Amino acid sequence: MDSLRNLSRSVRIWIFILSIVLSLVLVFNITAINKDKGIGFGNGLDYGLDFAGGTEIWLKLDGNVSPEVMTIEKGILENRLNSMGLKDIPVNVYGDQYIIIKIAKASPEEVRAIEEILKQQANFEQRIDGELAVKGSEIKIDLNTGRSGIYPAGSGGGYSWEVAVQLNQEGGCRFGKVAAGKFYGLDNPRNRPVDIFLDRPEGTTILMTETLHGLLGNTSSSAAESKDIYFGDTAVQVIENRSRIPIIIVYENDMNRTLAEYEKYDKGGFTRTIVAEDDAKIPESVVNKVRDLGITVQRIPLSDDQRRSPEGWIKNVTGLKTSPRLNFDTRGECVYAAQITGGASTRQEAEDELRQNQIWLTSGNLPAKASIDSESTVPPSLGAQFLRYSLITGIIGIISVSLVIYLRYKKLFIVVPTIVTGFSEIVIILGVASLINWEIDLPAIAGIIAAVGTGVDNQIVITDETIASRGGANKKSASLAERIKRAFFIIFTSAATIIAIMLPLMTFVAGMLKGFALTTMLGVFIGVFITRPAYAKTIEELLKSRE
Amino acid sequence: MFDNIYSTLVGKVPYRSLIFIPIVASILMIVIVLVNGLPLGIDFKGGTLIEVATDKSFDQQTLDGIAKDLSEIGLKDLKVYMGRDIETNKNKVSIATTSVATFNETRVILEKYFGSLRKTDIATATLQNAPPEDLSKRLTVRLKQGVDVSFDNSSKVLTLVSIDMDKTDLENALKDFVGGGVQVDLQKRNMNIDAMQPTLGEKLKTDGLKAAVIGYILMALVIFFAFRDLIPSIAVLLSATCDAVITMGFMSLFGIVLEPASLVALLMLVGYSVDTDVLLTSRILKKRKGDVNEGVDSAIKTGLTMTGTTFVVMVVVLFISTMITHVATLASIASVLLLGLVADVSSTWFMNAGILKWYIEERGGKFNLFRRGRKK
């Protein structure tokens, strides 16, 4: 009873208990760290590819690139994946040549599409009033000169940014010709916009009702969007003239007229159509008639908000990214260098815009070419099986540890704290992993095994030193305090050694080794500062009470 | 139990001869690794791993035939072997090659042996009417996994393709989305192919080696700092090095491939090895004079318990993961650790203990070259 009272007064024991309780709360998802899952063991954890399933792709860039180029390359890929509607796909950089993409829960078709997106260069176009001026392969931005940057804007405050671009002969001369007559004077509001498109849909038409067409025909400005895309044009003109995407109107009472339009465009290679409205306005039966012509149909309806300010929707369906205003006279001559400028009210915004524009401008011409160097897939059900088996193996492992400890000491009061400590180390490691959103995968499990393994080793050292100090074989042995001190010298040295070995592995951004290193170190820290002091105290008290 | 192990041992064998056992073993293993090489997994050298789940059982002759056929389309260093697929519990044929191969390149040959191969689950169902247009989206949300939907208007056959589908879940989902009583025919994926370019493998290997070398240097610094005594520190490092070298020799002998999992095991091993060495050294250095045997006897009792627990756990893990669960990563870690622990027993208790005994008994705990022994 004395020992229990002493234990309940020990700070170490309380820290230990508190850590376990907190970890359990996290691991059981009681705090709802993972909102989509309910309460249950393991629901507070994030699982890596090994257990959750998914596809991992390693992209190799053609040659080693600088960190700046790497950032842009990463941005382009994220941009492309986002524009496909694939958000939350982690894109990670490894070294100066590799990019790792992890895709979870995608369908096989999506995975294929992603592969294509990653390898392909985006279709970049600059168009002035719909005329093609520059293609992606013809433009490049100069990342290394001081000509791109951010400057405080003059009188009005705020910041302006500038990206310098170089055009090759073909692109430069086409741009010169197309831009002729579109410039009316420096900063003149009549200057035409240079529309920048990424993956503008080719061979595509848009199907809409007469009502919507009328609405868009009258929209030529918007309060919602800070960056104007209209430049005096109507929404219909932006779509039809500047983006070169024909609009077809659905006449429900005279479907043949609509279908005749489709047939006319079909001959011109327009084989895809976007339906701009939902079921209620353009019924599925109508859409099916279009499908029967062999046209691929995609429905991207405008929301109610978008009907009031359709810029977002227009950008989405046309691939229009930005429309800087032309601000110099080409006189029809070839242009080999140009600047694209813009402004924002804060430095951060200006930086973001600059980065975004750099990404757009280089999308058609990735700074470094990318190829897929490795691809592996783990099906989710297989991953779940892996996880189950790892758990079973772990539990049987701990049972066998307790058997060995029992054989050695023949005392249950030593076995029980050892096992409890082992389990609690696992729980606290998982708790911390949940807190820092670290993904649990096979290497993490290996790390936990390593950490718990050294944990048990250390507990044996503590136990033996404690027993010896209490007059085991050698009566003249050192005092308990000295013994415990020695035990902790061994523990700290072994912990420091493990951390020394693991630390360099943390430079591995990817692959097995980083996860292993991190969980092992985590386990060692938890062991040294939380569980082993508590264990030492418990064993000491238990031995004392049994004298 | 286990009292006076070391005293008894050195009573029979001169302790200086014991010191050389791990050293000779290490030299032997270095020769073996140099001659035999260390087999690398595809993560470290690039290549392709194809796994096919099948109901059939193949004899060695057929497996050789597969290898021969694949070598004719230019795949190098082929290894074809049978195993068990943990997901379906069917037989699994694994094909490893150092070449980079795609599904399409190998498909014709493989289908000759295994029948039709699928990288994805494919489900078909005959419907009365066309499914709702957003079926793909709804299924993806419901099944938490992307599903590709296609519908043939003339035959009314709905085809669903996904990396992973469960028949019951799918039938329930279709019941809700397209109406009741839909019969689903689900064909599970039966093959997986992972490929890695050699350059990437090379890069990972180099980085792994670099990290291991830096880790080793940092570990040496920690040990020197902890003991502040040259000879005991060297003994600890030598012991850890012998463990790693002997284990790599075993890997070369038994054909255990060096891959991330076994590299992890090697690092774990060095960690465990240092644990027992630190225990031994700190116990012995407390008494600089007199008979070291008594100290080793007490340390060995603790040390063998430590090694014993790890050993037993790894035997259990190896047994479970090779016989029951077939989780190759855990089996690889366990087998490397087991071999390493055997090496560790000899390097700690034969060599490290012997060096310390010599240091304390013959040199009085001082080593004059650097005059850095603790003065007491």
Image (tube, coloured by chain):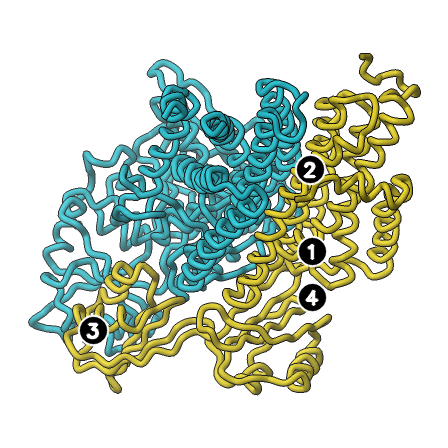
Chain colours: A cyan, B yellow
Q: Chain of mark 2?
A: B
Q: CA distance from mark 3 to mark 2?
A: 66 Å
The residue that disc 3 covers is B131
Q: Position of residue B22 (x, y in %)?
A: 83, 46
Q: Is residue B335 above or below residue A488?
A: below
- Badge 2 and badge 4 both on one subunit: yes
Q: Position of residue A489 (x, y in %)?
A: 64, 24
Residue A387 is left or right of residue A292, and the answer is right
Measuring 32% from the left and 50% from the top, which residue is drawn there?
Answer: A242
**What number is the disc on residue B56?**
none
Q: Residues within 10 Å of mark 3 (few under 14, many from 20)?
A: some
Q: Which of pointers 1 and 3 lies earlier in the amino acid sequence? A: 3
Q: Foreground mark, 3 or 2?
A: 2
Q: Is residue A340 above or below residue A246?
A: above
The residue that disc 1 covers is B258
Q: Which of pointers 2 and 1 lies earlier in the amino acid sequence? A: 1
Q: Which of pointers 3 and 2 lies earlier in the amino acid sequence? A: 3
- Badge 3 and badge 4 both on one subunit: yes
The residue that disc 2 covers is B276
